[in-house]
Structure formats: C-alpha cells, structure tokens
Amino acid sequence: MRRTGRRPGNPDTREAILAAARDAFAEKGYDGASIRGIATGAGVDPALVHHYFGTKDKLFLATMNAPMDPLEVIASAAEGPVEQTGERFVRIFLEIWDGPAGSAGVALLRSTVGNEWTTRLFREFILTQILRRAVPKLGLDGDEGRLRVTFAASQMVGMAMARYVIKVEPLASAPPEVVVAAIGPAVQRYLFGEMPGVFPAA
C-alpha cells in the first residue's frame, strides 16, 4: 500500500545534513556553526537544510536527538508562582522522561559518557539551549543567574542518570510525585534560594 501524507524526503540527504551539523557544532560550537557552512559540509544547498529542519535551533536539537525542546520546558516551568518553579521543572522533566521520548533522553546521556565528541555537543546543548534561555526567562541576572541554572541543571542531569540510565533503586521505581517532592525543593533553592558562602546576602 502507498503511504499517504507528506513525503519525508531523501533519508540520505537528511543524514548527510545531520552528520555535517554534528561535526560543525562539535568543532565550532553552536554560535560558530552556520547553516551555510553545514550545507557546504553536507554538499547541499542551504535551502535544503531549512527545508528539512527549519531553524538552526531545530537542527541542533535534531543532531542531539533531544527528547524535548528546552525552550518549551523552560516556558512551562516559568508559568505560575515563583515559589513552585523547582517542583514544576522536576514534574515536567519526569513527564517527558517517563513518556515515549524518554528513550531518546537515555540514549543522549549514554552517548555523552566517555566520548569527547558527544560531550562537546552536550556541553553546547546545556550552554546555548538551557542556560542562555533559562536565565532571562526566570528573571535571573548575569553570572549569578548562570551559576544558579547550572546548579539546577546538574541536579536534573544527575537525577536522570541515576533514575533512567544507571537505574539505581529505589529512585528508579519511585513514583513521580515522590521524586518531585524530594528534588523539587533542591532545584528551587538552586534557582532562587539563599546560598550562604556562594552568593552574597541580598
């Protein structure tokens, strides 16, 4: 039977673009890589890159096989009372990782361990897709805001490694509401709480 709907395009072309994009992002960083340069590396017209992936952000997320768009997660977590932001972050994170997209997240984390190339990509992912977007969206400022978001991100990545990759019990099978209640306040403190010895008192 013939498949209906929009044709996905040539998979070889798509993979060539992804391969060139991974190389460019790893070698030059997100800011240094360009759609034109990636297209040249893939041997295609820049218009084809836009056709397959749209924006540079979406292309980068595709190279990472990211389980979610960080901008959507940050925007959702930022909505509502500030004092519940940490819990919202953890809850949304768990909903994604416990869902169908979770396998992509596990593969992403596994690929970063012991591989310098994928580690560079993951670092760019955190710096450009999470830090750069979360700091202003959460109303944080400058160096302190970036450090706070880094602390929170380290908590979330550590939780993901323990729960989904290494599968350490009882965390691996703990109900989501238990994880939210336990880790949400820690994320909240990293983002907005007083941290004597780290930041000067207001």
Image (cartoon, grey):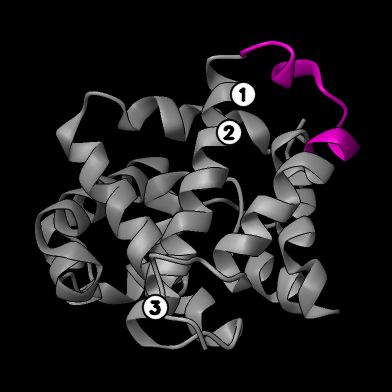
Residue numbers of the magenta segment: 168-179
Is 198 on the left or on the right of 79, as rendered?
Answer: left
The residue at which mark 2 appears reads as 160
Residue 10's label in the rendered image is none
User: Which residue, as the protein is rendered here, is positioned at the far top?
Assistant: 169
The mark that comes first in sequence, 3 or 1, is 3
**Residue at the location (82% across, 22% down)?**
174
The mark that comes first in sequence, 2 or 3, is 3
**Residue at the location (44% across, 78% down)?**
145
Q: Is residue 68 visible?
A: yes
- Find numbered disc 1 in the image and state the secondary structure of the residue it sits on: helix
Q: Is residue 177 magenta?
A: yes
Q: Amino acid at mark 3?
A: Glu
Is 71 on the left or on the right of 100, as rendered?
Answer: left
Q: Nearer the viewer, residue 152 or 119?
A: 152
Q: Amino acid at mark 1?
A: Tyr
Residue 164's label in the rendered image is 1
